[in-house]
Image: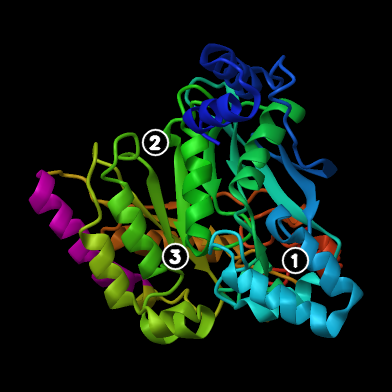
Amino acid sequence: MTSAEFVRATKELTGLSNPLALAAYRRLFRVGASGHSACVPHVAPIVRVLEDESPEGKVYKFLQRVPAVAEANQGEYESASRTPDSGLAALHASLAATPAGVRPGSSGPSASALRLTQFRELDIESVLIPMVGKTGVLHYTLCVSSQVGCAMNCGFCETAQMGLIRSLTAAEIVEQWFAATHLLGHTVRNMVFMGMGEPLDNYDNLMQAISVLIDHNGAAFPASKITVSTVGRLDGLAKMKAKLNSPGWHRLNLAVSLNAPNDEIRSKIMPINRSMPMAALRDMLTTWPIYGGGKICMEYVLIPGVNDAREHAAQLATYIAPIDAYYATQTNAKTPRVILNLIPYNPRRNSPWPAPAEEKVDEFLGWLRAEGLYAKRRRTKGRAMMGACGQLGSESIRKRRLVEVETDGGSLIQ
């Protein structure tokens, strides 16, 4: 709940006065405990923490355990587990009638419900990524999950191999920040929705969670320090675009997982492109709201032999040019709107592709810059523990082993 929602609810349920309720809420988010019996946090327990070294410090991947079915559907789930045939039918009907933010998303309630009956509990994976800024002070970027699994089926992504199990509630999303801050004790400076799941496939819970995080009486996390990453769901982008016109939301950041220079390649590795092609995506991004010179980040996972040729860099420049041109006419800015974030591929389990060699990453980055693009390379962190970009996926479901990562040059990475 936001602070206003909490104050109203506690007044109705307990009679607690507004000032006392607000004080308890503030203390809960800022200290980690409320000091009042009417405001006792329930936080999914951390069941495992993995560590990996990086030049900036340790990368932490932590797992929190949640029920296989959100609380709203727990009774139906238990019934289905006891009587599979009739119970599953009831569960399917219940999930179909539940608000979209709670029920499993675009893979359909029936497929997800069948998966849910296999599990009593699920693990959420989140990653704390160390950053050292210009001041030399260590802080963390928190990579947040919005779903367990994902329905988007991108071929290069570990999470996609799970399918969608269920969407997370707003509380379960906020709990990841709470656990990182108050249970693990790390200073979170930035938050990116780049963990498990497609955030815009869980739009209502995503926006409610962000509402809680940016609440000035709670976490008071700046919207300008939060980035929502999407595969390019046009329906969700349209709703998010309208949301940015609301007070307090103007500077929420957007990242788009592009990963291909043309429709042919993108449709092969990202099925979403078959129904929402690159031209339509560009139209959406060209008129994306402009507040305070905010940039649009385009993420490009570099996959050997798939999207790493010289002509692909030129095609990317042609694709992005209209977005930058429109931005220049609206703002007279001398800098481009789009930042291209080059991400060396982190192989998933049973991947058909290796990781790119360092020389190839540097070469492609040089081609991008030669084309006039504002491009930078994302440093790989957490690969050895399956915590890098595209590698998250619940072990309790996948029963995964760590991947021995080789580059296209043959040398062992881990």
What residue is pinned by disc 3? Answer: 364
Q: Nearer the viewer, residue 412 or 200?
A: 200
The disc, 3 or 1, on the residue closer to the chain's N-terminal end is 3
Q: Nearer the viewer, residue 305 or 197?
A: 197
What residue is pinned by disc 2? Answer: 224
Q: Which mark is residue 310?
A: none
- Contact flag, marks 3 and 1 (Cβ < 8 Å): no
Against 308, residue 334 (above or below) is: above
Instruction: Tell me the amino acid under the disc marked 2.
Output: Ser
Prevailing secondary structure class for the magenta stretch in the rendered image: helix
Query: Is residue 326 found inside the magenta-colored segment of the image?
Result: yes
Residue 57: x and y in percent read: 69, 33
Residue 202: x and y in percent read: 53, 60
The disc, 3 or 2, on the residue closer to the chain's N-terminal end is 2
Against 295, residue 407 (above or below) is: below
**3D distance between C-alphas at marks 1 and 2:** 35 Å
The disc, 1 or 2, on the residue closer to the chain's N-terminal end is 2
Residue at image location 46% in from the left, 39% down from the top: 211
- In the drawing, does residue 65 fall left or right of residue 132? right
Q: Is residue 184 visible?
A: no
Disc 2 is placed on an element classified as helix
Mark 1 or 2: in front is 2
Residue 52: x and y in percent read: 77, 44
Q: Quadrant of residue 410?
A: bottom right
Q: Is residue 402 visible?
A: yes
**In the rendered structure, which segment of residues is drawn in magenta?**
313-332
Against 137, residue 358 (above or below) is: below
Q: Residue furthest right?
A: 82
Screen quadrant of the C terminus: bottom right
Disc 3 is placed on an element classified as helix
What residue is pinned by disc 1? Answer: 405
Residue at image location 54% in from the left, 62% down from the top: 99
